[in-house]
Each structure stands twice: as C-alpha cells, then as structure tokens.
Amino acid sequence: MAKQNIDWANIGFGYMTTGERFVSNYKDGKWDDGVMTTDASVTISECAGVLQYAQTCFEGMKAYETCNGKIVVFRPDLNAQRMEDSCKRLEMPVYPKEKFVEAVCNVVKANRDFVPPYGTGATLYIRPYMFGSGPVIGVKPSTEYQFRIFTTPVGPYFKGGAKPITIKVSDFDRAAPHGTGHIKAGLNYAMSLHAIVTAHAEGFDENMYLDAATRTKVEETGGANFLFITKDGKVVTPKSDSILPSITRRSLMYVAEHYLGLEVEQREVYFDEVKDFAECGLCGTAAVISPVGKIYDHGNEICFPSGMEDMGPVTRKLYETLTGIQMGKIEAPEGWIKEIN
Ligand SMILES: *Cc1c(COP(=O)(O)O)cnc(C)c1O
C-alpha cells in the first residue's frame, strides 16, 4: 500500500484514526484470540469497572522508518513487561507478553501506510491499553476486560530544534509512597491534570514533583523521568519506588555507560543539589529528551549553565546516540529493535 497523503512534518501530537486496531476480550478467566477491526469505537456497560473505579492502564511506544527503509518498534518487550506490572497492581489479568509483542507488530503492519517516512521526524505512536469492561458497583475488580492497541501518527516533537523548557516545583503530589506512581495507570494522569493546567496558566511547561513524604527529593514530571548531568560529566537519575520506570531513561542510562563511556548513577536526588548540576533533561517516548533550562521554585530560580537556547552538550550526545540507534544509523544493542516484516 502507498503511504497516506499526510503533511508528516506538521501533524503535531494528536489523535487521528488509522486503518485497523487490535481488540481482545477477557471473560470467564481467559483471553480470546483477539481480532483486528476497522471499528474505532468501544461499546461497554454503563457500569464498567473503568468508568466507575478507573480500572485501566496503558502503554506508549513508537514505530518508525529507519534510514534503511525498515519499519521498526523500539523495545516492545519492555512495554509488555511494564504492562504486566501495571495489571498486577490494579488486579487486572495479564495479557501474555509474547502475544502483546505479536499484536503490536500486527497492528503496525496493518497500518504501515501510516508510518511516517524516514527523515520527517514524525512517528507512528502505538497505544496499548486495558480496562475493566464488565459491570461493578460494589468496589471490586471487574471480571471482564478488554485489551486494545491503536496507532496514530504523531509529528516531530521539536519543530525547529529542541528549545529548553522551564518547569516549576509543584505544590501538588504525583504519587504517594507505596501507591501507584510506578505503574502506567490512567488514574495517575487524571489527578495530574489540575496541576499541569495550573502550571501552564502560570507560564510553565511542566511540573517537577518532589517525593510526597518529605518534599525533599526529586521524583519526575507528569509524564517523563529526570536525567541530570553533573559538572564533571556524570549522568544521574533519581531512584524512588514511586517513579514510573521510563524505558527511554533506562535506554539512555545504558547508552551513557556503554556507548559514551560516562559514569552513571541511579540514586536519591535531593532537590537541594539540583542547583549544582550542569544540565537537566526529561526523558520519555514522546521527545526522547526535552532539555530543561530553568526550574522555578517558589520565587527562586535555578538556571542551568546549558542555558535557554540549546541542549547541553552531554544531553545532546545522549539524544543523538539514542536516536541514532533508533533510526538504524548506530548499531543497536541486541534485542532493542524489533523489525516489522
Ligand atoms: C510513560 C511515562 C514516562 C516515560 O516512559 P517511557 O517508557 O520512556 O515512554 C515517564 N513518566 C511517566 C509518569 C509515564 O507515564
């Protein structure tokens, strides 16, 4: 099939219906075989567990065309594992990991004319998700579930270069100790909407959340993990049980150590030490790394030496190496790139 006639470089990050999506239902204790469908609508009970008690989790990853014209997905096995972890915490049935990866590949294959061409910066975003579809009125897990995967093309995250952003230390908490911050649950996002709308209204791009118990340690933003670079070039990322384990962050830490020969550290990061770092970035599937230029904390500003014009030099190296691996220009570690045939 021919590529869709889309202005790939200018589509932004929004939802667009594509050709086919995958649907599988869980009932009587087991998953059915699942089907591909052109129907983009979901019909469920008015009393479905997802609608009443938010029993739902999701994943996010991308398919894209490499410099050799191959269509690939980046580390979908890690998304499958993370969704398993999310499901277990939410008392939802696990969708088998091998079948998850197979379904992701099938959905991408079915929508290959929506995979943006190499060089446009655009990608095909893949959204697997699961929700309680059976009725529950007393608070308990649903007995029926639906697992779906749709795709939607998204534009380049940075148009005209990655400009550093300004973030604020939030007065809201993202995740409680021993709560659900480490899983990819919709509920973590529902309660963050007020905080992000407030931050935007105040002129900030994102929120930095501190640990809820002591408000002294850096956690993450609403949807991305932090990476810091020390003045002597070490890569530091916060460690906490309430941070969502970003696949991009884990990949960047590997790249820092094994491709760039940098020292890496995953440890508790106190907010008090943030002013001493040389560079700061946010990592996630959407942008890979968004450079942070400035952090606003109740009247005090932390301005990183990397400034407000460009990514810092180490952040840039990390960004270029990981995107080079993803785009097929740099050899990938074993198992990172799943080719769609
Ligand atoms: C999805 C997500 C991330 C980024 O994870 P990636 O696997 O790198 O896309 C970071 N923080 C939160 C809260 C998330 O939901």
Image (cartoon, rainbow, N blue to C red):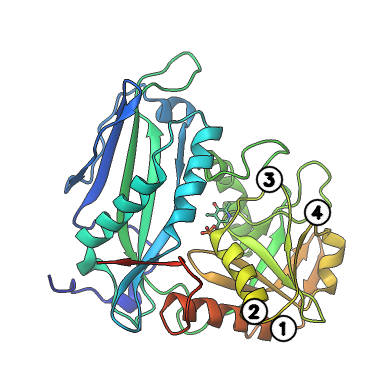
Which residue occupies 84% across, 58% down? 270
Q: Residues within 10 Å of mark 4 (few under 14, many from 20)?
A: many
Which residue occupies 35% across, 69% down? 72
Please give the residue where the numbered disc 3 appears in the rendered image: 242
Which residue occupies 57% across, 56% down? 223
Mark 2 or mark 3, which has the lower sequence index?
3
Q: Residues within 10 Å of mark 2 (few under 14, many from 20)?
A: many
Q: Is mark 1 within 8 Å of ligand 1?
A: no
Q: Residues within 10 Å of mark 1 (few under 14, many from 20)?
A: many
Q: Are marks 1 and 2 in contact (CB under 8 Å)?
A: yes
What is the CA distance from the residue labelled 1 to the residue labelled 2? 10 Å
In which quarter of the view is residue 253 placed? bottom right
Q: Label 4 sits on what residue type?
A: Lys
Point out the residue furthest to the top here: 138
73 vs 79, left or right, is left
Q: Label 1 sits on what residue type?
A: Ser
